[in-house]
Image: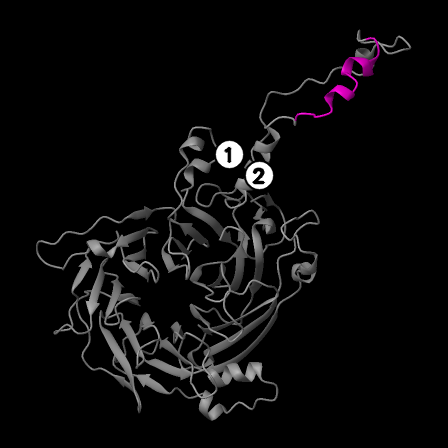
Amino acid sequence: MSKRPSEAQDGQPSKLASASSKRDNVEMEEMGEFEDAWEDEIESEEENLGNGDGEDEDGMDVDEVLPAIEESEEAPPAPDVFIPGKHSLGEGEILEADDTVYVMRHSMNVNWPCLSFDILRDNLGDERQRFPATAYIVAGTQADTPEKNEVIIYKMSSLHRTQKDGNDSDSDNEDDDDDDLDEDAILEYRSIPHKGGINRVRAQPVAAYPDASQPYHVSTWAETGKVHIWDVRPLIESLNVPGYVLDKSRAHKPVFTIDSHGRAEGFAMDWAASGTSSLRLLTGDIHSKIYLTTSTPSGFNALSQPFTSHTSSVEDLQWSPSEPTVFASCSADRSIQIWDVRTKGRRSVAGIISAHESDVNVISWNKLTSYLLVSGGDEGGIKTWDLRNVQKIGPNSTDPAPVASFSWHKAPITSIEWHPTEDSIFAAGEADDQVTLWDLAVEQDEDEAGMGESFAGESDVPPQLLFVHQGQKDVKEVHWHPQIPGTVVSTASDGFNIFKTISV
């Protein structure tokens, strides 16, 4: 990423992702000349110059008129690459976005910061590749006063491909010209009044967008200590159906409120995957308690007995993608614990007591390789765990070593999530203003390891770090879009970004 004095840019990447393209260009230049198949029919250099002694036909000394150009043996200067945590900006300098490493990049400002959001599944199809794209999200605000807060459904449409320079050759299909227009996106929204700031929002997982007879549930963890469940389907329909009359008496009232936590607020919350006969929602609070709420034919039912093994605030929860009765939790007590809802006494069945050096803020359970779990700590560490090695908690139990560990970030990890269709890739959001994309399948190339650095400081970059996206302040949450492959949505104190890179 280059640096220049200018106005601030939104959604700016590090050059980590684009440095490889610059390196490839240098390598091509050093490969040498192509062999000329018609060499015998081309006049020699000596014949072109005349008599070969440095004089032309008029007797003029060519070397006197045009002195020989000495070729420099010095290597071309390395690209000016900005590495977060290693380099700092000078006075008046800002990072400039390199749009050649993006397929799409848009930013969205909001009235109030949103600590949390989730992506809503739509009926526009899966595996969408064409542009312009459309995406729906649900978000919760952190307003300056409790009564100003809202649950908001956003529809982002006309998300065009990022325009590149005229020499760009990424799109070979002339029919895709309209896809490359870098026009302003369209933002529409509907909102629900919400008492108190919203710590976390989670949408009910659905295999397909519900039909007209089915509700679409969203849960919100409020700073008041209550968890509300809403049916947001009417709000989505009002965005999509011309002339739709929104029944506010229905849409603005939660279908259920969980009071199990008393006045203790919380952040941890997760819906079980669809495919079971009833809906199941886990919620964890700052007083170390976890509660389960299930649905019945007549409505929702909050179970009164909590799960209790943690000794400090429960920070995140994740249902197992393969075992419907198993879930994982992480806590400010530095542990990750595994639970089975069938266990008597509501105690954890296994765990990692010292998973991180400080609070374990977030976890994500791999939906494709179900024994892998990734965690992010308050110290900035990211660790991947093989749950087959996790033991039952007891006096003689030992913690397993992580299968991968990264200390790239120096600020708390605030969000982490596995890619929905690639089991080695995950995204992370950090308080150091970065969104990073990682691939555990990438290994250091031994042939390149001893060839020197392609740019200054490259040796400090883990080979598994695919991409660094910058430009937001205090990143809070990151999610992959399940229907638009490779697309990432992130929220921060200054708004939302939605982007897709050439790296994933």
CA distance separating discs 2 and 1:
9 Å
**Helix, strand or loop at mark 1:** loop
Residue type pointed to by label 1: Ser
Judge from the rendering whether residue 364 lies leftward or rightward of residue 9; answer left or right: left
Q: Residue at x 30, y 76 (%)?
A: 281
Judge from the rendering whether residue 42 lies leftward or rightward of residue 181; answer left or right: right
Residue bounds of the magenta highlight: 35-51
**Helix, strand or loop at mark 2:** helix
Q: Residue at x 25, y 77 (%)?
A: 292
Please, is residue 448 above or below residue 478 in the view? above
Rendered location of residue 434, percent (x, y): 46, 53
**Residue 378 is inside the magenta segment:** no
Q: Residue at x 81, y 14 (%)?
A: 47
Judge from the rendering whether residue 67 lies leftward or rightward of residue 448; answer left or right: right
Rendered location of residue 201, percent (x, y): 40, 73
Quadrant for residue 40, please give it: top right
Which is more toward the observer, 175 or 155? 175
Count of residue discs: 2
What residue is disc 2 on? 22
**CB within 8 Å, label 2 to label 1:** yes
Residue type pointed to by label 2: Lys
* Mark 2 nearby-residue class (10 Å; few <14, some 14–19, many ≥20): some
Q: Residue at x 32, y 71 (%)?
A: 269
Please, is residue 399 above or below residue 60 in the view? below
Please, is residue 88 above or below residue 242 in the view? above
Judge from the rendering whether residue 26 lies leftward or rightward of residue 429; answer left or right: right
Does residue 377 show up? Answer: no
| Mark identifier at residue 454 | 1
